[in-house]
Image (spheres, rainbow, N blue to C red):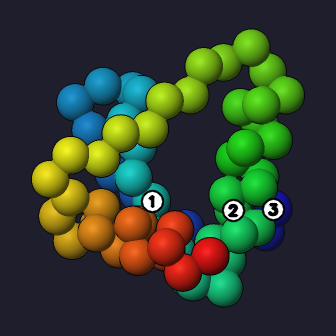
């Protein structure tokens, strides 16, 4: 998708991954990630509880779409 990932972090399992990228790349990155998950038999669940800085930024981006 030609998206530059500025930072990536893995949580306590391989199912929890956080990425930081430029705002202008968000939609292209999200569509690329969705195409991989939704064209496969992989189940994707997203949950945010007590968001900190990264989770709060994600919620802001989702709200602004």
SS class, disc 3: loop
**Mark 2 burial class by Cα count in 10 Å: few <14, some 14-19, many 20+:** some
Q: CA distance from mark 2 to mark 1?
A: 10 Å
Q: Position of residue 32 (x, y in %)?
A: 77, 52
Mark 1 sits on what residue?
19
Q: Quadrant of residue 54?
A: bottom left
Element marked by disc 2: helix
- The residue carrying mark 2 is 29
Residue 59: x and y in percent read: 39, 66
Category of crowding for the residue at label 3, using alpha-carbon neighbours closer than 10 angstroms: few (below 14), some (14–19), many (at least 20): few
Earlier-in-chain disc, 2 versus 1: 1
Q: What element does badge 1 sit on?
A: strand
Q: Is residue 56 left or right of residue 63?
A: left
Q: Is residue 30 left or right of residue 31?
A: left
The C terminus - image quarter: bottom right
Disc 2 vs disc 3: Cβ atoms closer than 8 Å?
yes
Q: Give how far across and how far down residue 37 sits, in percent.
A: 71, 31
Q: Is residue 45 left or right of residue 4?
A: left
Q: Nearer the viewer, residue 2 or 41?
A: 41
- In the drawing, what numbered circle is on residue 1? 3
- Asked if the residue at tag 1 contacts the one at tag 2, i.e. Cβ–Cβ closer than 8 Å, the answer is yes
Question: Within 10 Å of the Cα at label 1, are there few (<14), some (14-19), or many (20+) other Cα atoms?
Answer: few
Q: Could you give the CA–CA distance between mark 2 and mark 3, rounded to whole angstroms?
A: 7 Å
Distance from the alpha carbon under mark 3 to that under mark 1: 15 Å
Residue drawn at x 69%, y 47% is 33
């Amino acid at each position: 998708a030609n998206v530059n990932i500025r930072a990536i972090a893995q949580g306590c399992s391989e199912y929890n991954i956080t990425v930081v990228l430029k705002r202008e790349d968000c939609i292209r990155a999200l569509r690329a990630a969705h195409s991989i998950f939704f064209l496969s038999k992989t189940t994707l669940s997203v949950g945010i509880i007590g968001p900190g800085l990264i989770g709060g930024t994600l919620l802001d981006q989702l709200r602004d779409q």
